[in-house]
Image (spheres, rainbow, N blue to C red):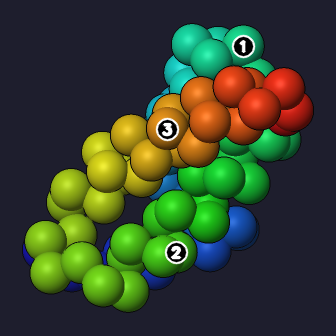
Amino acid sequence: MPDRARSAHQRPVSDDATIMALAKQTHTAHDVVKSLYEEEIAALHDKATVKSFVPVIASRRVKQRLKAMKAKGRH
């Protein structure tokens, strides 16, 4: 399977659905979740040897970051 190019302009539809779901689940603004998700995707994508797991890991890391941010009283 060819490696998909990742950019803010060519994000797969499944990523948009993931971002919307994360925003709803965490009661966080869509733009905040989108920014964090894109950061995590970029950080993981370059290092990952199995690219199909990147969105799953990125989602988990976004949830962890949001939880930490809310615990500190900011978001």
Number of residues whose C-alpha sits closer than 10 Å to that of mark 1, classed few (under 14), some (14–19) or many (20 or more): few
Q: Which residue is mark 1?
A: 27
What residue lies at 80% left-to-right and 41% top-to-bottom? 32
Amino acid type, label 2: Ala
Give the SS element for disc 2: helix
Give the number of the mark in front: 2 or 3. Answer: 3
Image quarter of the N terminus: bottom left
Which numbered disc, 3 or 1, marks the residue that appears first in the sequence? 1
Q: Which mark is residue 56?
A: none
What residue lies at 20% left-to-right and 60% top-to-bottom? 52
**Mark-to-mark CA distance, 2 and 3:** 17 Å
Give the number of the mark in front: 3 or 1. Answer: 3
Give the SS element for disc 1: loop
Q: Residue furthest bottom?
A: 46
Q: Which mark is residue 42?
A: 2
Image quarter of the C terminus: top right
Residue 51 location (% of width, % of height)? 22, 69
Residues at circles 2 and 3 in contact by the CB criterion of under 8 Å: no
Q: Which residue is mark 3?
A: 64
Above or below for 53 versus 56: below
Residue 69 location (% of width, % of height)? 72, 36
What residue lies at 30% left-to-right and 85% top-to-bottom? 47
For residue 57, say whether it is visible: yes
Give the SS element for disc 3: helix
**Mark-to-mark CA distance, 1 and 2:** 23 Å
